[in-house]
Structure formats: C-alpha cells, structure tokens
Image: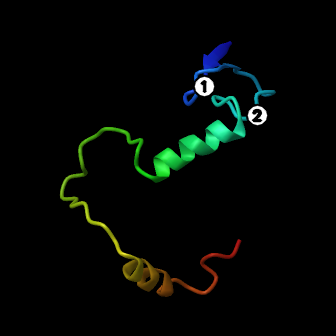
Amino acid sequence: MEVKCPICTKPVVWSPQSEYRPFCSKKCQLIDLGEWAGEDRKIAGKPAQGATPQAMDIEEIEAMLAQQPNDFFKH
C-alpha cells in the first residue's frame, strides 16, 4: 500500500521497511513534530467539562518539578 507523506505529499510505501512511515523522511517527521509542539497542529474537540485553559510560566513548571521525588526522571 502507498500513502502520501503528510508534510511534502511524496509517495511512501506503507511497510516495515519504511522507517519513518507515514513520513517520507526523518526531516518530514521532525517538521510534523515541531508543528504539534508549536500547537500549529491540533485535534479539534470540546474542552473537558470544568477545564479552564491556562498557560503556565517557567517558574510554575520549575516549582512543580521541584516537588517531584529525586528519582522522577531516572529510568
């Protein structure tokens, strides 16, 4: 089966040999990841009931991470 790369639309064979499927290359895979991370791509939906969107600043994130156990990031 063949699909189009979601980024550049080049044909991609859908098989285990296509390492980056559905993308044609690592470059297109990373472009897509960057678009999701930058919130250029989103899945439409209704907000969860009672959820209020709020942006966290870096200080809030750091404070939250500081409350984690020391081995939180260890594998």
Residue 10 lies in what quarter of the image? Answer: top right
* Rendered residue at 63%/37% (across/down): 28
**Mark 2 or 1 closer to N-term?**
1
- 25 relative position to 45: left or right: right
Instruction: Please provide percent x and percent y for residue 3.
Output: 62, 17
Residue that numbered label 2 is attached to: 19
Instruction: Please provide percent x and percent y for residue 50.
Output: 18, 58
- 4 relative position to 24: left or right: left
- 68 relative position to 45: left or right: right
> Camera-side residue: 16 or 11?
11
* Rendered residue at 46%/82% (across/down): 62
Specify few, some or many for label 1: CA neighbours under 10 Å numbering under 14, 14-19, or 20 or more.
some
Residue 20 lies in what quarter of the image? Answer: top right
Q: Taking 28 as reference, is 13 above or below it?
A: above
Residue that numbered label 1 is attached to: 5
* Rendered residue at 55%/46% (across/down): 33
